[in-house]
Structure formats: structure tokens, C-alpha cells
Amino acid sequence: MPTIQEEVIRELVERVHDSPGRLLLVTAGAGTRALAWILGVAGASRTLLEALIPYDESSFDDFLGRKPNKYVTARTAGFLAGRAVVRARHLFRGDEPVFGLACSATIVTDRPKRGQHRAHIALWTAGEVNRYSLYLRKGKRDRRGEEEMVSLVIMNALATAYQLNIELPLPFVDGDRFSHVCSDITGETEKVLNGSQEFFGLQAEGRFVSKRNAPKVVLSGAFNPLHEGHEGLAAAATQILGHEVTFELAAINAGKPALTIDQIKERTLQFAGKNNVLVSNASLFTDKARLYPGATFVVGIDTAQRILQPRYYDDNHDNMLAALADIKENGCGFLVAGRIDEHGHYQRASDLVVPDPHGDLFSTIPGDVFRIDISSTSLRALDTSSSTG
């Protein structure tokens, strides 16, 4: 005879299977009972795209694309969930939403552990990132009991993903600790589009970037889609400048319609678990320089040329000089990727005609560090922003 809890779990899973949305689940260290509950109800093929259990460090690192500083942290769980949702987008091309749900845990084993028994769970959707941290008092449960606690948190996260009004009770004991925080991407996007906020930043693990942490290097674009041209350019900039590149999605571009909320959320999702991304309403580089003082903007030669053309400043040379002066005053500059033009000439920053005293605003990415000879129009790569001033 099933218990009341088992009946509620079954109801939750049935409702998940009957709801739109495809899930990619990653569990390391604990959480496999949640997978058994999902698979134990008919209809799992409508829900589950893939389940991964990267127990060995090599498997864990391979999925994450990096070796984390620590394996069982909230940050690492966020990275896992981000990579999971990106993989889900790759596997599923339908109209339903996709979710990345991940757990990194350390619980009772056959040998004593010095650290805390704990689990960090993260749920990444297009509209929000939920992060759950569970600390279990040692000695109060056997492995089955700790596994069940972790799996119950995972199931509650699953209910959140599918917007189900079901919450499984968690049987806490004295000494347990639990927290839940949410990064509301939809809400922040709405603020940018309605003008009440100029930008927001999302870290690769799903936390919002503090406004105090101005990015050092920014690569701006529409990222429709993010591809190897953008990633290669970012890697080259990191190699040259010694700082990680932050991508900036321009929600509003001069002369183009603003992106919709759904477009912004979908494009932002491409960076989950891997790169920091900003979303801003700054359509001009003068605006970006004010938002990100001291930043170096990574651009293609096409964009650099437009920055220096008075026709983008109401055909006014003085307006162009004023814009360049504003960018310099905010401590910003440009790192420029070259490419071959239609005449077979490799164009680089040194070929730009830059008016005095602004020659030092533009520096070159050497061709042996990064070079791509397909036009930016064809690949949407080197025209990294439609911004012009």
C-alpha cells in the first residue's frame, strides 16, 4: 500500500509528464532516487531528454567543460544546470520549453567524511535560475534517508520548472539547514526593456552580477546565434588582455526594433553554465562606456570602421570626435579583429584612419592569434555589434 508521500510524488510526476517542457537531469553524489521516481511513472519519454550521473571526476569535468575549484558547491551546481539546459536546447528543437536540473552532493558513504553532508541543486530555465542548498546534520540519517531528502528537493525544483502547485514536505531534523534563492531573469529583462534599468548581468553559474563589478572586457552583439566565431574572438581577447570576456546582448540597437522578452531570454540561455552575459539597452558605444567604465570593447574591423565614419553621427565630424572623447574619458578602448576584405587585403586596426588624439583607442588582435576570413555578413561573427558611437 503506497504511503501518502508516495502518492503525492506519483501525482507530481504524472502532472509533469502531462505538461509541456523537456528536462535534462544531471545528478552527482545523490539524487538518483528522484530519477527513479520520474522513470517509475509511465510517460517519462514525454519529459526526460537525458539523465546523466557523472560520478567520476573525469566524467564530471568533461560535462562541465572545466575542472571546478570545488565539486560540491552552489556555484558548481549552477554551472551544471547551465550546461544541462544548453545541452537540452541542442537535443530538442521543438516548441516546448527546456529545463536544466542539476545536483552536486556529498552524503553518507561507507567511510567517514570530515566535511558537511550537503547537496546543492540548481534549476535553469529561460526565465529564472533557482538554487537550493541543503545541509544535513551528520548522524541523524542513513544513506537512504539522506538520499531521499536530496531527491525530495530535486522533485520540488521539478515542480517549480513545470509551474505546478505541489510542494513535497521536507522532513527536517534539528541541525539541518536549507536555503532557496531565485534569479528572476524575466523580471530583470522587463526592467531593461521598459527603461527602468539600463542593464543587468548574469554570471555563468546563474547569479546576478553586482553593479559594483564592472566588466573588464566586453564583446557585444545580437548572438543570433552564439557560435564559434564569437567564442574564438572571446578566447583571443582573453589571451591578449588577461581578463575573462563578458558578452553583452544588446536588447536595443540603433535603427533596429528592440528584441522581445522571449528573444532576450532565449539568447541569454546560450551562455548558461559557461559565460557571463550582460543584457543592456545601450545602443551606442558612448552609452556602453558610461555603463562599463574602464572596459575594452572587442569588435570586428567592420564595426571599428563604422565607429570612425561621420555619417553615423548625423554627418557631423565634430559629433564623431565628441563621441570618441567620451569613450576615452570613461577609460575605454577597442580591441579589433581583422579580416580579409573583398579585394583580398587583410584589414587590421593599424589600417584605420583615426583622428588625433584618439589613435590609442584602437588596438589589433594579431592574425596569428585570431583570424577569420569569412565576411561578418555571412557568418554574423565579426560584426559583433551594430553599435556605432
Image (spheres, rainbow, N blue to C red):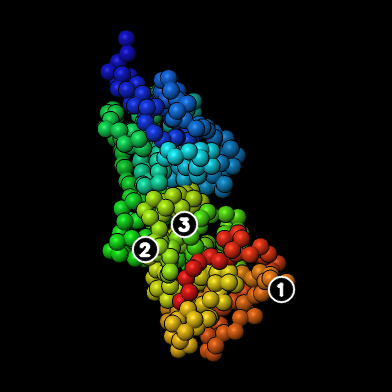
For disc 3, the neighbor class at 10 Å (few under 14, some 14 to 19, many from 20) is: many
Disc number at residue 276?
Answer: 3
Give x and y (percent) for residue 280.
Answer: 39, 63
Instruction: Give the answer, above or below, for where 263 lies relative to 117.
Output: below
Could one spot residue 241 in this view of the protein?
A: no
Instruction: Give the answer, above or below, for where 261 lies relative to 1.
Output: below
Q: Which residue is mark 2?
A: 199
Q: Which residue is mark 1?
A: 343
Q: Residue at x 64, y 71 (%)?
A: 338
3D distance between C-alphas at marks 3 and 1: 37 Å
Q: Residue at x 53, y 54 (%)?
A: 226
Q: Tell me the SS state at disc 2.
A: strand
Q: If you read the primary sequence from the N terminus, does the residue marked by circle 3 or circle 2 appear first?
A: 2
3D distance between C-alphas at marks 1 and 2: 40 Å
Q: Residue at x 48, y 38 (%)?
A: 94
Q: Tell me the SS state at disc 3.
A: loop
Q: Amino acid at mark 1?
A: His
3D distance between C-alphas at marks 3 and 2: 13 Å
Q: Nearer the viewer, residue 124 or 374?
A: 374
Residue 304, quarter of the rendered image: bottom right
Left or right: residue 68 compared with residue 173: right
Q: Tell me the SS state at disc 1.
A: loop
Give x and y (percent) for residue 1.
Answer: 32, 9
Q: If you read the primary sequence from the N terminus, does the residue marked by circle 3 or circle 1 appear first?
A: 3
